[in-house]
Image (tube, rainbow, N blue to C red):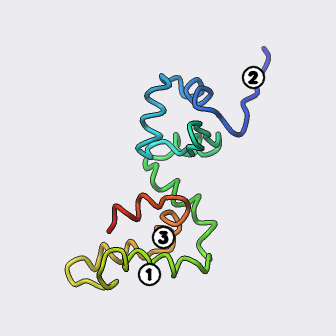
Amino acid sequence: MDKVSIPDILTLEETSEYLRLPVEIVENQALKGDIPGRQIENNWRFLKSAIDDWLRSKDSRSILLSQAGAFANDDSLAKLRETVYQARGRSEISETSENQLMYLLEPDTLTYLYHGHSSLIACLS
């Protein structure tokens, strides 16, 4: 039996076939951020390794954060944090939401927000 070769980077259709799900479901889940993928203009691309990790994981968010960890030492994260709080119109420390704030200030969370997710920054403000 011949072994089928699967590319490292998958299209929406290839990901749909790989997951054995309808294209519409894969696209909707990717749009919600539940399946790790990247939309480039009108085209979706998925790393096969990220899909495999996602399938093994109970929490797709942890995969995204672990992949973003490569940027943990990025010096521009401090500027991003400052920009987020300026957009919110408040200081970084709030008595009512200190625990939530501490989570948002974790390097992995900031890295995830920084890495191409400016729409999330708008939601946080």
Q: CA distance from mark 2 to mark 1?
A: 49 Å
| Residue 33 falls left or right of residue 100 | right
Q: Is residue 120 left or right of residue 108?
A: left
Q: Earlier in the sequence, mark 2 or mark 1?
A: 2
- Return the disc, 3 or 2, that comes first in the chain's sequence: 2
Of labels 3 and 2, the one closer to you:
3
Quadrant (top left/top right/bottom left/bottom right) for the C terminus: bottom left
Do the residues under discs 3 and 2 have CB atoms within 8 angstroms?
no
> Callout 3: few (<14), some (14-19), or many (20+) C-alpha neighbours within 10 Å?
many
Q: Quadrant of the N terminus?
A: top right
Numbered badge on residue 110: 3
Q: Is residue 125 above or below residue 29?
A: below
Q: Is residue 104 rendered to the left or right of residue 76?
A: left
Residue 67 vs 22, above or below: the answer is below
Residue 95 in the image: x percent, y percent?
Answer: 22, 84
Q: Secondary structure at mark 3?
A: helix
Q: Position of residue 22 (x, y in %)?
A: 48, 22
Disc number lying in front (3 or 1):
1
Residue that mark 2 sits on = 4
Counting from the top left corner in percent of width and height, residue 90 is at 29, 82
Report the residue at 60% width, 27% height from top. Answer: 18
Q: Amino acid at mark 3?
A: Leu
- The amino acid at mark 2 is Val
Residue 37, above or below 27: below
| Residue to which mark 1 is pinned | 82
Kind of element beneath mark 1 = helix
Q: CA distance from mark 3 to mark 2?
A: 39 Å
Identify the amino acid type marked 1. Glu
Location of residue 112 with respect to 33 vertically, above or below: below
